[in-house]
């Protein structure tokens, strides 16, 4: 019994940070991502089967919203530097909750499009402000540690939300789906109240100072941002290419997709914080990204080999591939955060984080089409090409960060 209690205690110490600032940040993230997991699981089903929009129109609206929202990333960073990130981040959380509740009124494509754009804009502003908050709560390892906790908690929150969303999927009623929508809206408001308890961070740029775009003029930083956008395509592999590959090109059962994704989720929840320790130094971070490139390249080869073999071997190869992929994701993420924070000008951290966020936004916009063309249209050779791309990107990132290829 005592051994059991000791094990629980060790688990709590690993999962729940002792630092009060980390706990508050993590709690706000957990509440918000739990709500996101609730509704994102049933979103497409609700708007297509209940509201009657076509899947193509839903996808179009979300793509347009994603593109428009990218325009607000850098301006949001400017606001963080001039007014401090906490207050605006709280307002962004609250605004997301209000906009989300507005989806109850959707009965046409135009309304869905407008609300999707509004949600994308306030969501981008909020995410940029939260990244700026992390950058201003410490330096070096401290920043990466905060970001690592948020990543672990995000996976946990979405996973829990997805599990509870299964109830609504089983009931398959309009009331059930709308209940999830309202719960998601409510979590934004609760998260806002929790986030407000974080310490106030003073602005680093005086309001009277002229508007500058130093981050957009920093060629090295733009270079690592572009490379990070390419490397971030491996996240799209998990959400788009791998499920399609399993179903269309392997003899593994469909439900094995859940097993593969569970390997990823558990790995990130348990090990992201541990792997991120010591990543505050950007040279070490660059080395981690290089390792990530080679690891994800190996994973691509293993995914390719799962085609054309019997079901048991395919299942083994797919799980092994995801385990290698998770390692690449863990070290690559911590290395990416180290670079994104460490190469930024301290006075303009908000603006720099706004620029760096573009890498994930652009990757998310072009990624689905790219990885589908590579993995599904080209087949096994496409996975080989992607492996080469990831390995090369990792090497180039390391060279750019440590070799100063582009003069500042």
Image (spheres, rainbow, N blue to C red):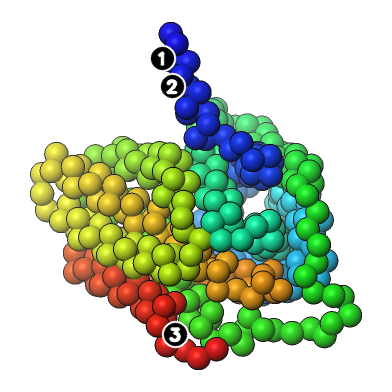
Q: Residue furthest top?
A: 1
Q: CA distance from mark 3 to mark 1?
A: 52 Å
Q: Evaluate if marks 2 and 1 touch, with contact meaning CB atoms under 8 Å apart.
A: yes
> Would you call the spot at circle 3 few (<14 residues within 10 Å), some (14-19), or many (20 or more)?
few
Q: Answer yes or no: is residue 165 visible.
A: no
Residue wearing tag 3: 404
Q: How many marks?
A: 3
Q: CA distance from mark 2 to mark 3?
A: 47 Å
Q: CA distance from mark 2 to mark 1?
A: 6 Å
Decide which of 31, 279 is in the foreground and name it: 279
Tell me where residue 323 appears, x and y as whole percent: 29, 47
Q: Earlier in the sequence, mark 3 or mark 1?
A: 1
Tell me where residue 266 appears, x and y as whole percent: 40, 39
Decide which of 31, 37 is in the foreground and name it: 31
Residue drawn where x is 63% and y is 32% of the image: 176
Residue drawn where x is 46% and y is 58% of the image: 279
Residue drawn where x is 47% and y is 28% of the image: 11
Which type of secondary structure does the marked residue at label 3 adopt?
A: loop
Q: Evaluate if marks 3 and 1 touch, with contact meaning CB atoms under 8 Å apart.
A: no
Above or below, 103 against 397 in this view is above
> Would you call the spot at circle 1 few (<14 residues within 10 Å), some (14-19), or many (20 or more)?
few
Residue wearing tag 1: 3
């Amino acid at each position: 019994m005592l051994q059991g209690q000791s094990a629980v205690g060790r688990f709590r110490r690993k999962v729940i940070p002792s630092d009060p600032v980390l706990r508050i940040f993590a709690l706000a993230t957990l509440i918000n991502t739990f709500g996101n997991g609730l509704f994102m699981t049933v979103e497409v089903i609700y708007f297509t089967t209940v509201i009657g929009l076509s899947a193509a129109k839903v996808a179009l609206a979300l793509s347009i919203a994603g593109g428009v929202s990218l325009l607000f990333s850098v301006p949001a960073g400017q606001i963080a530097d001039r007014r401090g990130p906490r207050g605006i981040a709280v307002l962004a959380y609250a605004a997301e909750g209000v906009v989300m509740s507005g989806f109850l009124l959707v009965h046409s494509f135009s309304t869905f499009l407008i609300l999707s754009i509004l949600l994308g804009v306030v969501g981008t502003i909020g995410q940029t402000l939260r990244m700026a908050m992390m950058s201003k709560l410490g330096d070096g390892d401290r920043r990466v540690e905060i970001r690592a906790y948020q990543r672990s908690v995000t996976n946990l929150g979405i996973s829990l939300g997805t599990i509870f969303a299964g109830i609504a999927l089983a009931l398959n009623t309009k009331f059930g789906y709308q209940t999830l929508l309202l719960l998601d809206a409510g979590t934004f408001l609760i998260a806002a109240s929790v986030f407000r308890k974080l310490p106030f961070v003073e602005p680093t740029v005086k309001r009277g100072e002229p508007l500058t775009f130093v981050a957009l003029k920093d060629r090295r930083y733009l270079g690592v941002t572009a490379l990070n956008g390419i490397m971030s395509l491996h996240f799209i592999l998990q959400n788009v290419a791998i499920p399609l590959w399993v179903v269309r090109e392997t003899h593994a059962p469909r439900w094995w997709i859940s097993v593969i994704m569970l390997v990823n989720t558990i790995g990130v929840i348990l090990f992201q914080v541990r792997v991120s320790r010591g990543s505050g130094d950007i040279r070490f971070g660059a080395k981690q990204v290089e390792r990530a490139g080679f690891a994800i390249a190996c994973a691509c080869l293993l995914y390719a080999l799962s085609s054309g073999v019997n079901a048991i071997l395919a299942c083994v190869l797919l799980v092994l591939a995801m385990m290698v992929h998770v390692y690449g994701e863990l070290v690559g993420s911590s290395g990416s955060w180290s670079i994104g924070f460490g190469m930024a000008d301290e006075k303009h951290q908000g603006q720099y984080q706004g620029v760096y966020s573009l890498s994930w936004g652009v990757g998310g916009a072009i990624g689905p089409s790219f990885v589908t063309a590579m993995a599904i249209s080209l087949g096994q050779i496409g996975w080989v090409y992607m492996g080469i791309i990831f390995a090369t990107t990792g090497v180039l990132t390391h060279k750019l960060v440590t070799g100063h290829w582009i003069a500042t």
